[in-house]
Amino acid sequence: MAQKQGSNVDAWLERETDHTRKALENASRHFDENDSLTVNTLEAVYGQESSFGGDMRKRGITGGAGHFMFEKPTAERYGLTVTKKNDQRFDVDDASDVAARYLKDLDAFFSKETNLGHGKKTMPVKSSSERKKFALAAYNGGEGRIASAQKEAVKAGKNPSLWKDVKQFLKAAGATVAKTEEIKNFLEKVLAYEIEFAKKSPADKKAKKKKPKKSGYRCTGGRWRTIDDQPVMICD
């Protein structure tokens, strides 16, 4: 009888060192009780983006690279250095921290109406579990594109706070056919991996209940927005 092969998650967990797990747990402290994001979400994104560091591309390139496949502009706006000699996208602590902050920012954008500039606004998604879908889709496709898809959904009489409705309008929002499929596939895979990580990973799911560690990162560019009646520098 043929031996049953392990899943991608099984392979990634074998690759996950104590250092990597701690980096992901520490990063997940940026999440809180207002979202449905956890350390398992980060593990799932990490696996999908670089196969847990197995495919990180070249240092210093402008395109996606490193543990979480940040493009250079995004990494720099979140305070990371990106050069051939020093590319912090390849440091698991730095990259995990930025990935968590980015996901938390995206979750905040879709928690209420947020002005993204250039005439684009997000529409509120009250359910934290549903909003996670929007945050993950925006992680891959950009919050502006997802906000535009929400607007197109409203025009068509659909619900802008349900991903199953909004995803139908990605092409109308400017995504190519290939990018539309990429966004959908990214979300489906990450959500499936997250469930499997939640069952199998030894990472501390309660880490998000702890306060984030102080970070030296700061935005090098961005826009001020008002979120929860507080001025916030949006780094992407």
Image: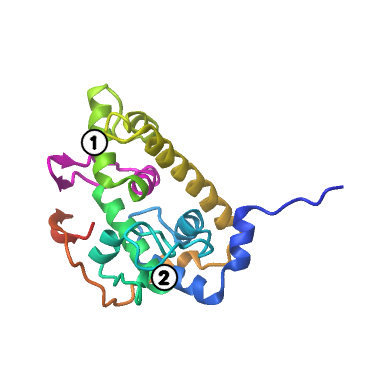
47 horizontally vs 84: left or right: right
Q: Amino acid at mark 1?
A: Ser
Q: Is residue 118 magenta?
A: yes
- Its colouring scheme is rainbow
Callout 2: SS: helix
Q: Is the C terminus in the top left, top right, bottom left or bottom right quadrant?
A: bottom left
Crowd band around label 1 with a 10 angstrom C-alpha radius: few (<14), some (14–19), many (20+): many
Q: Pick whichever of labels 2 and 1 is earlier in the sequence.
A: 2
Q: Which residue appears at 58% of the width and 62% of the height?
A: 201
Crowd band around label 2 with a 10 angstrom C-alpha radius: few (<14), some (14–19), many (20+): many
Residue 27 spot, x, y in % from top left: 39, 68
Examine the rendered structure and indicate whether residue 221 appears above or below residue 91.
above
Please name whichever residue, 123 or 175, is drawn nearer the observer in this view of the structure. 175
Q: Which residue appears at 40% of the width and 41% of the height?
A: 183
Q: Which residue is mark 2?
A: 90
Q: Is residue 128 visible?
A: no
Circle count = 2
Residue 232 spot, x, y in % from top left: 16, 60
Which label sits in the foreground, 2 or 1?
2
Which picture quadrant has residue 69? bottom left
Q: Amino acid at mark 2?
A: Phe
Q: Which residue appears at 25% of the width and 66% of the height?
A: 76
191 horizontally vs 6: left or right: left
Callout 1: SS: helix
Magenta-drawn segment: 111-137
Q: Which residue appears at 65% of the width and 52% of the height?
A: 7
Q: Is residue 135 magenta?
A: yes
Real-space Cα separation, disc 2 to disc 1, in angstroms: 32 Å
Q: Which residue is mark 1?
A: 148
